[in-house]
Amino acid sequence: MPLGYLVATPRGKCIMADWSPSIYLKFEDERTRPARDLLAQVPLTAPGRIVDMGCGPGNSTELLVERFPSAEVIGLDSSPNMLAEARQRVPLARFAEADANSWVPEPDTDLVFANAIYQWVPKHLVALTRIAAALLEGGVLAVQMPDNVGEPSHQLMRQVAADGPWAERLKHAARSALLPVRIYYDALRPTARRLDIWHTDYNHVLDGPEAIVEWVKATGLRPFIDPLEPEEREDFLARYLELIAGAYPRTIDGKVLLRFPRLFIVAVR
């Protein structure tokens, strides 16, 4: 779950935008599947302390509590809205605000679980290396990050941003691409006795182009549309939907397939 980000105002100042649990959870099953897949590769049987960094509305935290019912599970996020939702959803876990840019786990943490959070951290390689080094022997860092900025869904965001009257305001809105896999391996290998890195390409079956727009409105599209005025936002979304409809043709049953590559990392200290 992504952390809050900075939105530039006309005077150059920045405000922190919060996230909407209800919009994010419209596609809860699809968003939770990568967390399940990541958790399935965590080689722990009875961890004592688990941190779910970027816990969002608690869907990933819920998985951790179900698998490790005896563990102390702590959900961290920078979004007050997401934390409020998570506290209601997972009363057996503890939740607190934290900044993924600088956070470091306590030495007795057995598992740091980070599902779809660190792609939003500009220097996430530094952060991940710092976290891995802070764990004690046997501790696990489990990370999943969307690797989809090269997909039409994100290419077309950048195209609409560059071609419209908002181009100057949105010139830095795009999220950076992930690094080559070897870079992550070389950075984490010195502190990991076991390191597993892989990609999974999901093909999410959605109702139509409008569903793709709804999907990205909760995450990747937000840095593009949040700085806009309401009328501009409507115009941006209309242009974007038209391009998405052309890039994602309907299948035989009227659905569309949203291809979604994700990078997974499991490092054992």
Image: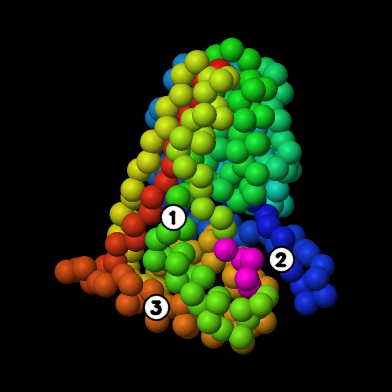
Residue 78 placement, left or right of 268: right
Sequence-first tag of 3 and 2:
2
Residue tagged by mark 1?
148
Question: Which of the two residues, 254 or 126, is positioned nearer the viewer here?
Answer: 126
Residue that appears at 42% across and 32% down: 197
Q: Is residue 45 magenta?
A: no
Amino acid tagged 1: Asn
Q: For the point 63% across and 72% down, which residue is it?
A: 170
Q: Earlier in the sequence, mark 1 or mark 3?
A: 1
Residue 83 in view (yes/no) = no
In the picture shown, does residue 161 fall above or below 188? Answer: below
> Which stretch is magenta?
170-174
Q: How far separated are the C-alphas under marks 2 and 1? A: 22 Å
Front in this rendered view, residue 98 or 122: 122
User: How far from the left and from the top, in percent, is residue 267?
Assistant: 50, 25
172 is within the stretch colored magenta: yes
Q: CA distance from mark 1 to mark 3?
A: 17 Å
- Residue at 29 percent of width and 62 percent of height: 257
Q: What x and y, as percent, mark residue 59?
A: 52, 44
> Which of disc 1 and disc 2 is earlier in sequence?
2
> Which residue lies at the image location 70% right of the left edge and 19% below the top edge?
107
Spot occupied by residue 165 in the image (x, y as percentages of width and height): 61, 86
Dot 3 falls on a residue whose secondary structure is helix
Which residue position is annotated with label 3?
A: 243
The residue under label 2 is: 7
Looking at this view, is 245 or 156 the one in front? 156
